[in-house]
Image (tube, grey):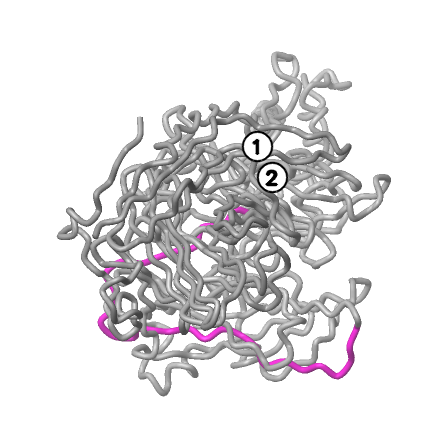
Amino acid sequence: MKLSYLLSSTAALFQVTTANATDDGCFHWNSQDDSLFHPNDWKYCQRIKNNLYMYYTPMEDTVMLGLHVVEDLYGWSALAPAGNGGMKGASQIVVRKNNDDEWIAEDRYSMEYTTPSMDAQQDVQLLFAQQDEVTGETAWGVQILVNSCDEPYDYPLEDHMIYMLWAFGSTHDFSFHGSDRGQFTANLMGLPPSEPDMEEYDHVDFVMPNVSMVREEEDLDPTNAFICSYFDLDVLGQEMDFTYDDKIHMVGYEPMITEGNAQYIHHMTLFSCQGYAQDGIGFQQELDDSHLYHQKVIPGCTNMPPGCENYLGGWAVGSANVAFPPNVGIPIGEGQRWLVIQMHYYNPGMTEGVYDSSGLRAHLLTKNLRPIDAGVMSFAAGVRTGQHPPLPGGQKDVAMETLYVEPDCTMGWSEPLTVFSVQHHSHFMGSHQEISVERDGINLGTMRKEYVYDYNHQSGVEPNNVVRTLLPGDRLVASCHFDTTSVLANSTVQIGEESNKEMCFPTLLYYPKQELTTFAYVPTTSYSQLYITDLEWCSQSSSEKDFESKCAEQLYIDVPGFSQFFASSLGYDGPSFDYPTLCNGGGLTAKVRSMSPGICPDNGCTETQSCSEEELREWVEGVCEFNCGKFGLTLYPDLSRTEPYNTANIACPNSFFDAPTLAEPAACQAKGSLPQRIELTNAEALEDVAFVPEYTYQDSSGASLIWNSFAVLCLFIVFLV
């Protein structure tokens, strides 16, 4: 059934909401009463740039979308909802004249930096189009669906900001746009964006002190330099009257890039230092900061300095400036004196003599802080060298191991969280990335719609409406896909920090701030060696009659050899010693016992160095039962489970578990259909305009294929006198 909208009769509902619409000329570009963009019809107007305007009216199932170019356009033009601000994954609405000199609207899409392809399902209806052959003034209006369910070629429209593209052609033959294109943000279901004035806030610049882009780490790729610099809040606060003990709010930040150096900067990240460091299994050690000073440079900084891992924000290629919602700020200070910025420089040509003073400008509130603290939630599915197995080469779609944040982990949140930005980060081979949310066994879908990841456009975007709020008990699932066809099939792609390796690191900006919001995947078998050198000991019998399990035997006779904890966390490289020496050794083994709670009997015999062999043998079996059980294994002679858990998230209390079976997301429900009858106040009639929701194209063999989604319909545009 066709739906007819008489927009002029509901003009009272359609108020101009752009504060400076008059100054921008939104509804006043034509002083005559015959303007095609009449405020009776168009609810919102957004100035994209000088002499370029977008008009739109959201309705229940459709959106009217219009473009006005004031002058100098003599060819095709396009608007495109996009997942990240680039062509990859964008859904283009192209309006042009065909070979018969008739105006047409085309629904196209692009997965690469190539000419956008025609969508088999045409979800656009042309309302009107005009172009002055002398001045080049161009105006057109179309209607599109709020949700066509044509994924991954169309984006569903929701009431939040998205990236959009515009582009022009010099003729009506659809071809390369040259430099006539750009990106902007818009909300096609609500108010146009308003840029916050960050000049009203104090700011500090966390910038590098003119460093040379040279990697001073031996045996590592010299084209990828990681350099850090410390910043002392007491020094930075002298002019703004604060100290590191004070609480400060960062309310936004932006990149400060040295002229000519943008091509070398891969990313920059800002961290605060807690004053202590954690080892591989969560023990904290206080740090000696007596050697630190303001703007101290660490020329080899692939891994963050110990204790400086509280992530505050960052920038990657293509990212936009960041401004937080008006009620939140990220806390800085509160006793944390030192901040560190890490710069990752990528110099594949090894250009010499390049120095850099780039960094981040942070906008601060030192008084009258905002009511809510914000935080950064990160998902390190594959970040550091050795964290994740390498990816096979020569494949179009390779999935990295999924990172699960289980319900018992998010139950640690004190209250529901509001997410206001979702950012994806991989390197050059990244093709798709997402964070999904499952609640009470129902898959709510992804946090963000980005059909194709683009390394050159890594800005954060607002989340999808249904997952804007996260609840304690939600399951979060982070996954990344890669296209490795650029390397040989018999080769591999390593995971790591360098640009020529790969990475999976999505992040969220959210509030209110929680303690537990940094999550990381590690292979179970590699991390287990911190607890027990060989998990097979759990399922093996002992060769000694005094023990049942091989695990208990190994711990009893060789404590340092039982796990890598002693070497990696304690730095122990001395001779072997047995379990009685550990528990009855007094001060000689006190450090080991203090850092391994529960490893010796808790009945007081350790303090008096009087634990009997019977007590120790019984206790050692219990230690093994605990360590093996942590990885899902029963202890011999119980062989009910001999395979370890198959995944891990080491940030959560229950770090090791079997990967869950996820619920399937609900099937997409399309809203509305086209064509629909639209009556516009002043639009010229376009007679016999064909709406064609099917597209005929040639496949690679030259055969003609027909996509039958609807029948061809005719639409007549009626205008009011």
Q: Which residue is mark 1?
A: 611
Find residue 82 and report its horizontal and vertical position in percent.
Answer: 49, 51
Residue furthest out toward the bottom: 239
Drawn side of residue 485 relative to residue 582, left or right: right
Label 1 sits on what residue type? Cys
Check if residue 167 falls in the magenta segment. no
Drawn side of residue 390 relative to residue 399, left or right: right
> Which residue range is magenta in the image?
350-379
Find residue 294 and report its horizontal and vertical position in percent.
Answer: 52, 81
> Is residue 268 something one can see in this rendering?
yes
Labels 2 & 1 near each other (Cβ < 8 A): yes
- The residue shown at (68%, 32%) is 555
- The residue shown at (67%, 16%) is 548
Say the numbered circle drawn on residue 584. Answer: 2
Give the alpha-carbon distance from disc 2 to disc 1, as whole Å. Answer: 7 Å
Q: Nearer the viewer, residue 383 or 588?
A: 383
Q: Is residue 14 above or below residue 555?
A: below
Mark nearer the N terminus (2 vs 1): 2
Find residue 414 and report its horizontal and vertical position in percent.
Answer: 30, 43
Q: Quadrant of the N terminus?
A: top left
- The residue shown at (32%, 47%) is 159
Say the numbered circle drawn on residue 488. Answer: none
The secondary structure type at the circle numbered 2 is helix
Is the residue marked by circle 2 packed among few (<14), some (14-19), or many (20+) residues within 10 Å? many
Is the residue marked by circle 1 packed among few (<14), some (14-19), or many (20+) residues within 10 Å? some
Residue 15 quadrant: bottom left
Label 2 sits on what residue type? Asn
Total marks in image: 2
Find residue 234 and report its horizontal and vertical position in percent.
Answer: 41, 80
Residue 170 quadrant: bottom right
